[in-house]
């Protein structure tokens, strides 16, 4: 199958699975958006090996057509700490960090722009399935400040570490507990990375999106926590990357990392 045939197959499978009358657009980009939406809203259910084979070929080809970035391509370095601006799903590292919610199943809002949705959409349906198995074994929601590790599937990284950051109600300032919980997110991820003997990890801006944690304070906590952890703990980590999206975030991190 070529990419168009794969796309048609994947959409058809997911629509048939839902047993709904869903109009399929004609142009490729609209079809691609529909596929992402169908993947986003799909609960973790059993799925055919043939679907996964086609999905993996399709998503892997998309990944390989992106401009992928490895450790050697990142120039802003201060010891083991690195700063990079770009799409975290294009990083070839041992683990990327996902800012998850307490259910740990990914974002179910079609095409939402949160990092949770972006990562799950690029990784494929197996990521939600693995997260679901982890949560079924655990038997309760993931606590704020804790983290879990999974495979990365069709992402260029080897693993995804999912952590639940504190959510700040609109109009309120973070409490001391919120600040401690955010620091705990970074410590939990770094601890898992060491436990699995990973050498590189890339952090997104945990809690700074829909969870409303002020960006400047979150940046301060992130950098201090990572620096303190690397100073005080033996770890296999050689590279800790802060991945930022906006120019404003880049400047905030740069000031705190390099002084």
Image: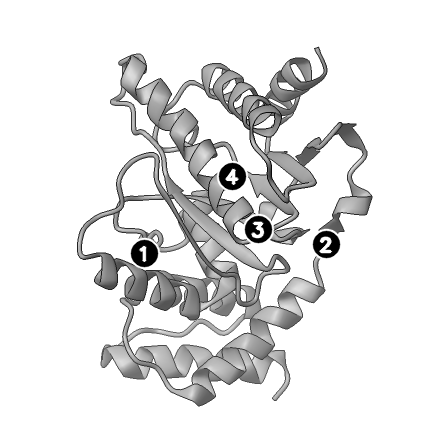
Counting residues from the start of the chain, the first of labels 3 and 2 encountered is 2
* CA–CA distance in space, label 4 to label 1: 21 Å
Q: Which residue sits furthest left?
A: 139
Viewer-side residue, 106 vs 194: 194
Closer to the camera in the image, 250 or 163: 163
Note whether 171 is above or below 92 in the view shown.
above
Q: In the rendering, at what x and y percent does residue 110 appear?
A: 36, 55
Task: Find residue 103 and report its horizontal and vertical position in percent.
Answer: 26, 50
Mark 3 lies on residue? 95
Residue 95 visible? The answer is yes
Residue at the spot 56% in from the left edge and 25% down from the top edge: 232
Q: Indicate which disc residue 190 carries.
A: 4
Residue 68: give its label.
2
- Pointer 2 and pointer 1: residues touching (CB < 8 Å)? no
Graded by Cα atoms within 10 Å as few (under 14), some (14 to 19) or many (20 or more), the crowding at tag 4 reads: many
Instruction: Tell me the element at label 3.
Output: strand
Which numbered mark, 4 or 2, is in the foreground of this view? 4
* Marks 4 and 1, the one that precedes in the sequence: 1
Q: Nearer the viewer, mark 4 or mark 1?
A: 4
Q: Which residue is mark 1?
A: 105
């Amino acid at each position: 199958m070529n990419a168009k045939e794969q796309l048609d197959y994947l959409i058809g499978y997911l629509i048939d699975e839902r047993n709904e009358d869903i109009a399929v657009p004609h142009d490729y980009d609209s079809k691609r958006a529909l596929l992402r939406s169908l993947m986003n809203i799909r609960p973790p259910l059993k799925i055919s090996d043939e679907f996964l084979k086609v999905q993996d070929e399709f998503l892997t080809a998309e990944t390989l057509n992106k401009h992928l970035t490895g450790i050697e391509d990142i120039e802003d370095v201060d010891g083991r700490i690195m700063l990079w601006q770009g799409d975290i799903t294009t990083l070839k590292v041992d683990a990327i960090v996902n800012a998850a919610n307490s259910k740990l199943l990914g974002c179910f809002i079609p095409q939402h722009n949160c990092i949770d949705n972006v990562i799950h959409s690029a990784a494929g349906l197996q990521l939600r399935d693995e997260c679901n198995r982890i949560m079924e074994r655990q038997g309760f929601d993931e606590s704020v400040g804790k983290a879990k590790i999974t495979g990365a599937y069709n992402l260029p990284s080897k693993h995804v570490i999912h952590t639940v950051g504190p959510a700040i109600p609109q109009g309120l300032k973070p409490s001391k507990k919120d600040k401690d919980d955010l620091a705990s997110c970074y410590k939990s991820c770094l601890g898992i990375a060491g436990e699995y003997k990973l050498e590189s990890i890339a952090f997104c801006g945990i809690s700074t999106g829909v969870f409303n944690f002020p960006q400047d304070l979150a940046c301060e906590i992130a950098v201090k926590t990572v620096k303190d952890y690397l100073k005080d703990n033996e770890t296999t980590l050689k590279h800790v990357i802060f991945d930022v999206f906006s120019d404003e975030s880049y400047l905030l991190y740069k000031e705190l990392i390099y002084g």
